[in-house]
């Protein structure tokens, strides 16, 4: 779907549509997701379809973080997907290497559906570590 490029007004101009987002991975070699991997990215969205919009990162993990940011910028107004406040340039890199959560299901039961929801939320907030306290000496709720 093309995205409307305007300041979120009701009037639409057909020439103001984002039809392409160029995705550029500078390091084509696959990299494992591990602590310290480069997750930085640069997202540049133009206000005109004549200008190039791009997402640039040095690894596929930076591209994933940039695509998450792009998805968070899109607004649905009931009939169109909108990108507001353009032109826009975001250059982002994680401030902390370890960005994560501790889940203690050894002492506090959580259904599997809640854990899946938690993983989706971690992605949206660009967290990279899940410490799962599954068992301890007093409890073993995990059936193997």
Image (cartoon, rainbow, N blue to C red):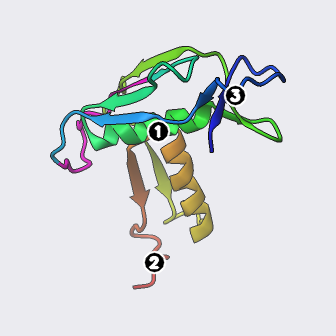
Q: Position of residue 43 (x, y in %)?
A: 43, 25
Q: What's drawn in magenta, residue-wise?
A: 30-43
Q: Which mark is residue 126?
A: none
Depicted 134 relative to depicted 143: above or below: above
The answer for how far apart the CA atoms under marks 1 and 2 are is 35 Å
Residue 54 makes an appearance in the image: yes
Q: Residue at x 47, y 16 (%)?
A: 89
Count the labels in the image. Answer: 3
Q: Nearer the viewer, residue 133 or 33?
A: 33
Q: Nearer the viewer, mark 1 or mark 2?
A: 1
| Marked residue nearer the N-terminal end (3 or 1) | 3
User: For the point 80% across and 19% down, which residue is it?
Assistant: 9
Q: Main secondary structure of the magenta part?
A: loop
The residue wearing badge 2 is: 142
Assess whether residue 32 is covered by the magenta stretch: yes
Per the image, the residue denoted by label 1 is 67
At numbered mark 3, what does the secondary structure look like: helix, strand or loop?
loop
Residue 98 seen in render: no
Residue 21: percent from left, percent from top: 46, 34
Residue, disc 3: 14
Q: In 3D space, how far apart are the residues under numbered discs 3 and 2 (Cα atoms)?
A: 56 Å
């Amino acid at each position: 779907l093309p995205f409307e490029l305007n300041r979120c007004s009701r009037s639409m101009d057909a020439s103001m549509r984002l039809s392409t987002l160029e995705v550029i991975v500078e390091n084509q070699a696959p990299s494992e997701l591990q602590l310290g991997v480069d997750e930085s990215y640069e997202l540049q969205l133009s206000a005109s379809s004549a200008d190039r919009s791009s997402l640039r990162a040095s690894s596929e993990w930076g591209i994933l973080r940039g695509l998450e940011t792009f998805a968070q910028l899109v607004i649905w107004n009931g009939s169109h997907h909108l990108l507001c406040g353009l032109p826009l340039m975001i250059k982002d890199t994680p401030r902390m290497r370890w960005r994560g959560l501790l889940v203690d299901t050894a002492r506090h039961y959580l259904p599997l559906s809640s854990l899946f929801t938690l993983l989706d939320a971690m992605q949206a907030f660009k967290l990279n570590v899940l410490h799962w306290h599954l068992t301890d000496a007093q409890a073993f709720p995990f059936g193997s």
